[in-house]
Image: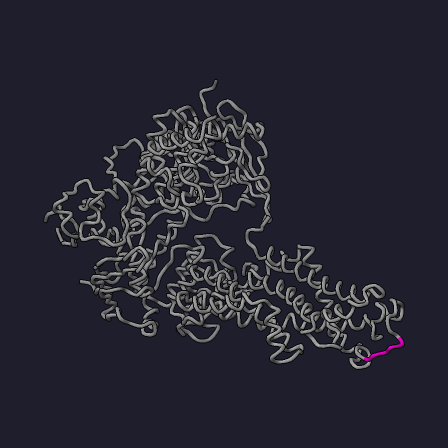
Amino acid sequence: MSDNILEVKDLVVRYETEDGCVNAVNGLSFTVGKQKILGLVGETGAGKTTTALSILNLIPSPPGKIVSGSITLNDKDVLSLSQEELQKMRGTDAAMIFQDPMTALNPVMTVGEQIAQAFKLHQKITQQESIEKAKEMLKLVGIDESRVYDYPHQFSGGMKQRVIIAIALACSPKLLLADEPTTALDVTIQAQVLELIKELIRDRGMSMVLITHDLGVVAEVCDEVAVMYAGRIVEIGSAWEIFNETKHPYTEGLFNSLPNLKKRGEELKPIQGLTPDPTNLPAGCAFSPRCPYATEACSKTVPELRHMDGTHYTACTAYDSPDFKLGGKD
Amino acid sequence: MAKVLLEVQNLTKYFNTPGGLLHAVDGVSFQVEEGKTLGIVGESGCGKSTTGRTILKLIEPTSGKIIFDGKDITGYSRGQMRPLRTEMQMIFQDPFSSLDPRMTVMQLIAEPIIEHKLIHGREAIEKRTLELMETVGLAQRLVNSYPHELDGGRRQRIGIARALAVNPKLIVCDEPVSALDVSIQAQILNLLKKLQKDLGLTYIFITHNLAVVKYFSDDIAVMYLGQMVEKAPSDDIFAEPLHPYTRALLSAIPIPTVGKEKKQRVLIRGEITSPVNLPDECRFMKRCDECDEKICGSCDPSLVEVKPQHFVACHRVKK
Amino acid sequence: MFSKSKLINKADAVKSRSLAQETWHRLLKNKGAVAGMVFLMVLLTISILAGHLYNYDRDIISINMDNMLQKPSLQHWFGTDNLGRDIFARILYGARYSLVIGVGAVTIGLIIGVTLGAIAGFYGGMVDQIIMRIVDVFYSIPNIMIAVVIVSLLGTSTVNLLIALCFTCATSFTRIARAAVMTIRDQQYIEAAYELGLPVWKIILKHILPNCLSPIIVQVTLLIGTTIIAASSLSFLGIGVPSPAPEWGAMLSEGRQYVREAGYMCVTPGIAIMITVLALNLLGDGLRDALDPKMKR
């Protein structure tokens, strides 16, 4: 029994579309320890959602295909499981919360029924018992039990997301995959929901992979952070290391783009250029065309993750020279 | 003191719904000086977007006054507003649906010019279009492209170019960067700031993102359920928020720092109440930790200046 | 309005495809649609040429009892009918009626329907209610009844048949246009046009309708098919195109009595109708797929 609830090694995922072959994930490796929260950070197109879907083997195929790599969840090799075994795994070993609470619930089923469904799929219980358990789950996420017979449209966005959390946690999975769980919510509701998630994860001894583009949320919630760009991890480490000893130029650029840390009047320092076209990735390091520190060597080979110190790794050719240091966050 | 470009007095907008009277905007007043930026902040349903649209008369106000550049435009008909459309413009939120998918970049940017007959002659119009593209940072080689071929950041630049095409004085920006990636957001915000400096524009910046509004605005107004609950210069609101809602809003923003001391979070209870058929009491009462039923339930608090330039609508805040 | 810039060199500007060009491209990949298009082109050519190849009085309608009910031969490719007329010539000539009636009724129906539908969809409220209730009334009256009423009032003729069939087409387009307009109306670029100060009629013509074309175009091809069948049915019943005109439905009707001895009298116009409508349907389906942004594979 390993110490890690999740181990992903060299994952490569592609989508074959009309416009070409989309290289969504290009050699991803990371681990999530038991009872740890990993934040997967990146912008649109970085490959975060594809990664999460791969963990549960939910990539729509066609057009997607997990080309190579391995995923070990709770000591099970996900990619070699049969459909039946996968169904058993989803919900009991790992569960997923999707981004948009508005469309994630079935509008013609009561909320209680949808939570009960999660129980019925994995346990042998009667209808009555499953509704009772659904009521308990509602209480757990801070919704009054009496609302178990209400329909999704009767709930606000924040409450819908709580229901979705209840469904995900129904069968006590060991790992929770949360894909931008609070992005669509108002700031004050976001705070409530994040607190709730943190509380539940700790109480139940679960692990979580939190996907987000919001660095503030990452700082609030995560123990470890992996920064993704163009389907690869460019920097990974503990939250403290990533935020206070930033090593990769892209991560530095992300911090510099945030208005939060700036005084009014000063210009923000956005990253120049645009995220690369996943059907036509640049040669070598995918970030090199936009990187202020790029050298010729950067466009020749794809940098591997190298150990910096502690648990901190980064994939940057510039560190070939031992004196290299970033310009620093402002 | 600089000239006041826009003055809004007691603006209200009610909608008749099957459930009752919806108080979308309920007695909002403010002034904006020329060349400055007013940020309007709030969560969904607070009425900030409706306020923005009502100022531009895209929606007819139920009551109140809108005075733009000295003219009372509250009662203006659509025909009377038309010439004013060259002075007040809007930048829309969604770069994916705010551009007609059948028009090229050139057609999109030239449309306002042609519609208001600002320039005549095809060549002159084209020249101006290319100039505008350069101003907003759009590569000229994209001139024949269609919106669906471009990314969000570029589309938003087209939106900005369209707004600038008529040389407006006032631009209402309705969540202009919310739909964009973080690094693109920064590019667009820099652009908007630069344009303000170069062209002397006045902005009303509507957003739910407090970090962005702090960076961008001179003054900030916080809205809740159709009312302005606090209004002050940007630095003042962040340094010393007085209204309980503002305090909760500020502490709810997740701060991207690790290991440094974090302030105590103020979590608001419950959900936003319905803006339909509101009784005459403080609207934030049911969620407020500092509420005193007797005082706060007596009547709706009005916006009062408790410090120089700092207005709050709360019974519990004394001068 | 000009879409391509003159000041920027063609070489410098990024090549881009409009939605129309992209649709055409995708349509060409669909074999069924291409087959349908080719057939319809052929049919159109035939119907134009038929007027030149044949003399109406001499070849199409003149009765020649010596020749009657001849089996298909080298002289008469499809044989002759009960009045000695060459069936092949009649079928070729008959294409004109089907095309004219189909395209004509649909075009008039389109203009009326889209106008009403756009107004109903854009304004909503009372205007919408009134227009749609009137449309509902016409929608619920069967084709045949409307045709009977018109024909009894105005007499049988090709033109009157066309008028009768307009009603169904118009109601169909009204509904489709209304739905499409209601979807587009809420898009932000319409709000932007409004904010620019454009008058309402300009917003509808310039921004809303061009973006509603997809469902309307698909409906045009499919509706031509159903209209042709309707025209044939009505002619079959004797209240459509009057004899001796070689309309396919009428020919079917005349061939009914001779099904046993001269089956080719029925089969040939029947097949003609079938293939035409099939071609239209294939084209219509192909267009629907090509226009659907979600069908990208």
Inspect this view and state whether residue A236 appears.
no
Q: How many marks?
A: 0
Q: Is residue A61 left or right of residue A266?
A: right
Query: Residue reaching furthest top?
Result: A1
Compare residues A94 and A262 and report the one nearer the observer: A94
Q: Is residue A162 left or right of residue C33?
A: left
> Which quadrant of the structure image shows residue A187?
top left
Compare residues C212 and A240 and report the one nearer the observer: C212
Instruction: Give above or below for B63 relative to A251.
Output: below
- Boundaries of the magenta span: C62-66
Magenta stretch holds residue C63: yes
Magenta stretch holds residue C114: no
- In percent of width and height, residue B267 lies at 25, 38
Query: Residue reaching furthest bottom?
Result: C57
Task: Give the color scheme: rainbow, by chain, secondary structure or one colour.
Answer: one colour
Compare residues A270 and C179 and report the one nearer the observer: C179
Inspect this view and state whether residue B34 appears.
yes
Q: Residue at x 60, y 59 (%)?
A: C23
Instruction: Give above or below for B276 relative to C260.
Output: above
- In percent of width and height, residue C62 lies at 82, 80
Q: Residue at x 50, y 56 (%)?
A: B148
Query: Residue reaching furthest left?
Result: B319
- In percent of width and height, residue C51 lies at 76, 77
